[in-house]
Amino acid sequence: MLLAKGSAVRQITKKRINWYGSVTVHPAIAGVRIFPRVESLTHRVLENNVLQVQATIKLFAVAPPATDLPGQNGQSPRCFSSLVDTTTFIRLRPLAHPRDILSIRHEVGIEKTTMRPGRISVIGRLDIEVEYLSPVSLNGRVTAFATGQPVAGAKVQVLDMEQEEVLYETTTAADGSYAFEGIDAGTYRVRVQASHYEPREEIAVLMLQDTVNFVLHRRLDQKDVAAN
């Protein structure tokens, strides 16, 4: 994992998929060699950061040079081909935009071939390597100690470690959750303040994503005093 400029981290995700195909050949052919080639590779980003990759692989069955088979116009058909379509889905880390997909590299190979009269069955592999940018994010939830209920409207601040400078600020939602997207990677202090509660402060270490939860205690002057 390499740190990228700005507020994103360069990620690489790899996946190997198996594919199956066949090539129709002359019934009398023997000693053929099979070669695969990726004809096309397309992709699109689906919901929940799932990348769909569709590949079309062309299979070549090439007979030895000495092969002499009857063909049209007196020419020997020494090369046969077919197409194989395959689709895979790859789970990525969070993406801010489809353009954050930087590259999709591939390598295709043959694992096993089975020769039958007039047909060659092929089992192959396709290795895919996706390089992309994933935004740095900080999130968490703020709850009350006494009740365990969420604290809505609490102020959440991200501060510099060395100074009191507030770098980012937000408020908690109705369920007590908060989130910051696009923060630069680094180490920060996270401070939470809410009416009638003691403030809390924690450390956040962001390389890609960190979750910092807070449990707040009510101020002493806000607690009910039990009657004797």
Image (cartoon, rainbow, N blue to C red):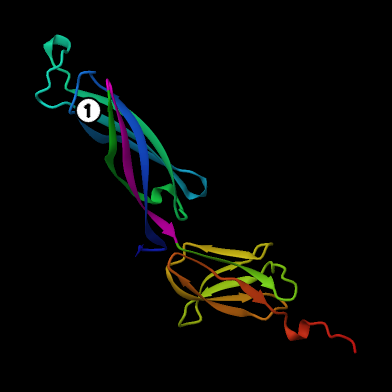
Secondary structure mostly taken by the magenta-highlighted segment of the chain = strand
- Tag 1 residue: 61
Residue sticking out furthest to the bottom = 228
Pick the quarter of the image with the N terminus. Answer: bottom left
The question of residue 132 being in magenta is answered with yes
Above or below, 108 against 203 in this view is above
User: What residue lies at 34% left-to-right and 46% top-to-bottom?
Assistant: 128
> Farthest left residue?
66
Q: Position of residue 157 (x, y in %)?
A: 56, 73
Using the image, determine if residue 44 lies above or below residue 9: above
Which amino acid type is marked by label 1?
A: Ala
Determine the residue positioned at 39% across, 51% down.
100
x and y percentages locating residue 14 in the rendered image? 36, 51
Q: Which residues are magenta?
A: 117-135
Where is residue 142? Give x, y as percent.
64, 70
Q: Quadrant of residue 33?
A: top left
Q: Compare residues 10 and 59 and report the one nearer the observer.
A: 59
